[in-house]
């Protein structure tokens, strides 16, 4: 079985699910598998892609359904009918995708974990149940990890499909806590495969050199502080603002690489207001930055995340919660010092590996700033960066992914 179909709501851009999908694709392709893609938004090779707008969580009809499903405990019969109709339509499109590309193995990417598109999850579940097709469900976030899904009128659907319990399905999660919760809540055995990075291939020199710094108005002796995340509340960007304020730089500036996520723009406005009160300038780069790892398709943005990291002097990662931590691995890969809040997955799955970083517990103090100054001393920074890179290669490389993923794929034979 060599033809693999990835299924998701969106496989495009710089979000964590898309980036990890790309890494799985790379590992499978170099081992002789052919990969194809079904989603509502695609940045994948056109000849391998099957675009279905109704699969996207931002489709107007899907958004309408989503709004009616959460925050209440009952639903109208008309809502159930609409969900079933869309499920049937999406299932027919999934069958068409599988037939067109002769798919032999399915890999749903988060589509059977977080209920952003309920009809799609139901459709994938029925497709697998009806065909018995071998499936590796890659789960990044679950509904029970998000407060906005706690009150629900679709608990029956969540139990059925987020995630489903089917004999031909293997489940993969990205951290130890998720593994335990999936076992406790659903009785499902699973495998932990962490997020990874291609540490065997060191980063190339930045093609645009210091152009990004210059365009943003940074001089050679200015400290470029990068917050490499989306603008959503769980990222705790206020802590990065406070850190920059305490550093008393000549120019208090924080560069945020991504736009707002799927949770509205209220939090982004709150961060801007808070930064103004502390005298910190926020520079949003969301319109400028794309992924350097975009399935061989030329990025339309002026810069990539590689450019952002290679121009940065310090990375801030103060998240209150992360499923794993792509930005952490990216900072280690680009040999940048990182200030990280000790979120739960970091404590359990990353910190024991021995990375030397500037960590804090929920709030920043002057002591953290003093540690940063010591950390940035050239001799210390070079030694730590090289050591962290080797630890990344040991624990979170493509080779680690390859060993675990190929074992799952080959178990279907």
Image (cartoon, rainbow, N blue to C red):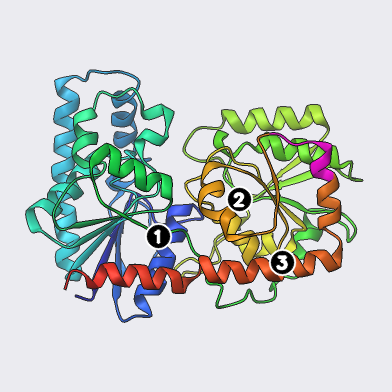
| Quarter of the rendering containing residue 210 | bottom right
Q: Nearer the viewer, residue 356 or 301?
A: 356
Query: Mark on residue 350?
Result: none
Query: Mark on residue 193?
Result: 1
Instruction: Say left or right for 99 vs 315.
Output: left
Q: What distance separates the C-alpha of mark 3 from that of mark 2?
A: 30 Å
Identify residue for label 2.
287
Please tell me whether mark 2 sits on a helix, a strand or a loop: loop
Range covered by the magenta-colored residues: 363-369
Residue occupying image coordinates x 18% and y 46%: 165
Residue occupying image coordinates x 62% and y 60%: 354
Q: What distance separates the C-alpha of mark 1 from that of mark 3?
A: 24 Å
Residue 137 percent coordinates (x, y): 28, 55
| Quarter of the rendering containing residue 364 | top right
Q: Could you tell me which quadrant the N terminus lies in?
A: bottom left
| First in residue order: circle 2 vs circle 1 | 1
| Quarter of the rendering containing residue 38 | bottom left
| First in residue order: circle 3 vs circle 2 | 2
């Amino acid at each position: 079985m060599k033809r693999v179909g990835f299924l998701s709501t969106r496989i495009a851009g710089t979000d964590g699910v898309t980036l990890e999908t790309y890494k799985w694709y790379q590992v499978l392709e170099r081992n002789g598998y052919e990969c194809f893609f079904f989603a509502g938004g695609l940045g994948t090779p056109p000849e391998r892609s099957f675009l279905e707008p109704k699969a996207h969580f931002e489709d107007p009809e899907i958004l309408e359904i989503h709004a009616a499903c959460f925050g209440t405990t009952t639903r109208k019969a008309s809502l159930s009918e609409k969900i079933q109709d869309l499920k049937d339509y999406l299932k027919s499109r999934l069958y068409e995708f599988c037939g067109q590309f002769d798919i032999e193995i399915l890999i749903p990417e988060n589509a059977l974990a977080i209920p952003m598109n309920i009809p799609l999850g139901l459709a994938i579940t029925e497709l697998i149940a009806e065909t018995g097709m071998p499936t590796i469900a890659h789960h990044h976030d679950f509904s029970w990890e998000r407060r906005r899904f706690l009150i629900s009128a679709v608990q029956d659907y969540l139990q059925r499909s987020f995630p489903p319990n089917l004999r031909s399905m293997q489940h993969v999660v990205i951290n130890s806590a998720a593994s335990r919760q999936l076992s406790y809540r659903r009785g499902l055995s699973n495998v932990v495969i962490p997020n990874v990075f291609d540490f065997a291939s060191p980063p190339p020199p930045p093609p645009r050199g210091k152009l990004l710094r210059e365009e943003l108005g940074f001089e050679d002796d200015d400290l470029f502080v990068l917050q490499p995340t989306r603008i959503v509340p769980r990222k705790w960007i206020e802590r990065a603002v406070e850190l920059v304020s305490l550093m008393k730089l000549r120019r208090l500036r924080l560069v945020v690489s991504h736009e707002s996520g799927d949770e509205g723009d209220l939090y982004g406005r709150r961060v801007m207001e808070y930064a103004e009160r502390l005298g910190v300038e926020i520079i949003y780069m969301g319109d400028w930055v794309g992924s350097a790892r975009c399935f061989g398709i030329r990025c339309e943005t002026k810069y990539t995340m590689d450019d952002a990291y290679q121009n940065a002097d310090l990375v801030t990662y103060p998240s209150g919660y992360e499923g794993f931590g792509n930005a952490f691995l990216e900072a280690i890969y680009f040999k940048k010092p990182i200030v990280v809040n000790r979120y739960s997955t970091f404590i359990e799955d990353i910190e024991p590996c021995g990375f030397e970083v500037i960590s804090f517990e929920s709030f920043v103090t002057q002591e953290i700033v003093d540690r940063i100054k010591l950390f940035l001393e050239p001799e210390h920074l070079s030694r730590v960066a090289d050591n962290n890179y080797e630890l990344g290669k040991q624990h979170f490389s493509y080779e680690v992914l390859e060993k675990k993923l190929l074992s799952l794929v080959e178990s279907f034979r």
